[in-house]
């Protein structure tokens, strides 16, 4: 995989500083997502990482880490394009586990939904930056666990696109593209039981889904590739969400028949 020089330097610095700040609390650092799936776009892609710790970050560790990230952002602009999830080793698949998230340049404490999708991503195509292989501590991810996670993902998208009265994302063009491409990946994973990049899933969807969805999928791909701001109509995304939800349940019944 090719990683831009500034990103490579940032990941090395991140790993070194995590080890210095967290010390014995640090279990491992794992890179995943588009950057390890040959789908990385330097103009638009995030850099996705998971940091696994033995226990929750202490207040001192949290404060030192936030300070380092703030300084790093001034030295390397890629810092604010990091998306880092901090999870506790024995709770990586536990819903409502305590966690931390660094996103959009902000470090905060949060809850985890025990998302197995990111771990399937790590296990299939991720890279270990520090620590043992993920296989050594991630519990088995069954088809049932995956299906439940895919259901939750559809629910999250429906919440932002349809249900939340004051969604901050609904009218953002790039989020609409994200929603369409994420639905493609959900449908691919429901059918194949594995994880691929949004680009790969979208190409698959164009070939295998009904013709009515091709336009918005291609529009989302063009917007993401070229950075265009042509917004996909909300009603079309809502219909695609309904289709994905129904298809996901159909695939699950077929697999477990």
Image: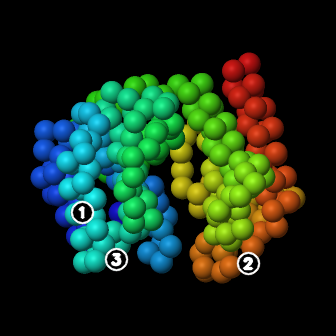
Q: Earlier in the sequence, mark 1 or mark 2?
A: 1
Could you say whether the residue bearing mark 1 is in a helix, strand or loop? helix
Could you say whether the residue bearing mark 2 is in a helix, strand or loop? loop
Do the residues bearing badges 3 and 2 touch, measured as CB atoms within 8 Å?
no
Q: Is residue 93 left or right of residue 145?
A: left
Mark 1 vs mark 3, foreground winner is 1
The residue drawn where x is 84% and y is 52% is 239
Looking at the picture, tell me which residue is in the foreground, 227 or 195: 227
Could you say whether the residue bearing mark 3 is in a helix, strand or loop? helix
Q: Position of residue 190 (x, y in %)?
A: 66, 38
The residue drawn where x is 66% and y is 80% is 228
Q: Where does label 2 land, which residue?
A: 230
Q: Where does label 3 land, which residue?
A: 77
Q: Quadrant of residue 17?
A: bottom left
Q: Where does label 1 land, which residue?
A: 67
Instruction: Report the residue that reaches farthest toward the top.
Output: 257
Q: Position of residue 57 (x, y in %)?
A: 27, 42
Q: Is residue 28 above or below residue 2?
A: above
* Separation of marks 3 and 2 at Cα, in angstroms: 27 Å
The reply to whether residue 172 is in sight is yes
Pointer 1 local density, CA inside 10 Å: few below 14, some 14–19, many at least 20? few
Mark 3 vs mark 2, foreground winner is 3
Quadrant in the picture for the C terminus: top right
């Amino acid at each position: 995989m090719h990683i831009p020089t500034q990103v490579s330097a940032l990941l090395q610095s991140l790993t070194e500083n995590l080890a210095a700040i967290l010390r014995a609390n640090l279990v491992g650092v794992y890179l995943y997502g588009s950057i390890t799936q040959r789908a990385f776009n330097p103009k638009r892609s995030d850099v996705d990482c998971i940091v696994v710790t033995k226990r929750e970050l202490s207040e001192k560790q949290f404060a030192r880490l936030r300070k380092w990230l703030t300084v790093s952002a001034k030295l390397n602009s890629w810092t604010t394009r990091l998306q880092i999830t901090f999870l506790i080793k024995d709770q990586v698949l536990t819903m409502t586990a305590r966690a931390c998230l660094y996103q959009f340049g902000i470090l905060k404490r949060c809850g985890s939904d025990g998302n197995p999708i990111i771990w399937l991503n790590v296990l299939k195509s991720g890279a270990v930056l520090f620590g043992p292989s993920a296989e050594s501590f991630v519990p088995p991810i069954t088809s049932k666990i995956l299906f439940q996670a895919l259901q939750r993902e559809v629910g999250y998208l429906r919440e932002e696109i349809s249900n939340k009265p004051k969604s901050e994302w609904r009218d953002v063009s790039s989020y609409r593209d994200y929603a369409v491409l994420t639905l493609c990946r959900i449908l691919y994973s429901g059918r194949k039981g594995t994880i691929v990049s949004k680009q790969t899933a979208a190409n698959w969807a164009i070939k295998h889904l009904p013709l009515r969805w091709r336009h918005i999928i291609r529009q989302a791909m063009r917007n993401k590739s070229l950075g265009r701001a042509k917004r996909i109509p909300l009603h079309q995304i809502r219909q695609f969400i309904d289709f994905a939800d129904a298809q996901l349940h159909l695939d699950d019944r077929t697999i477990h028949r």
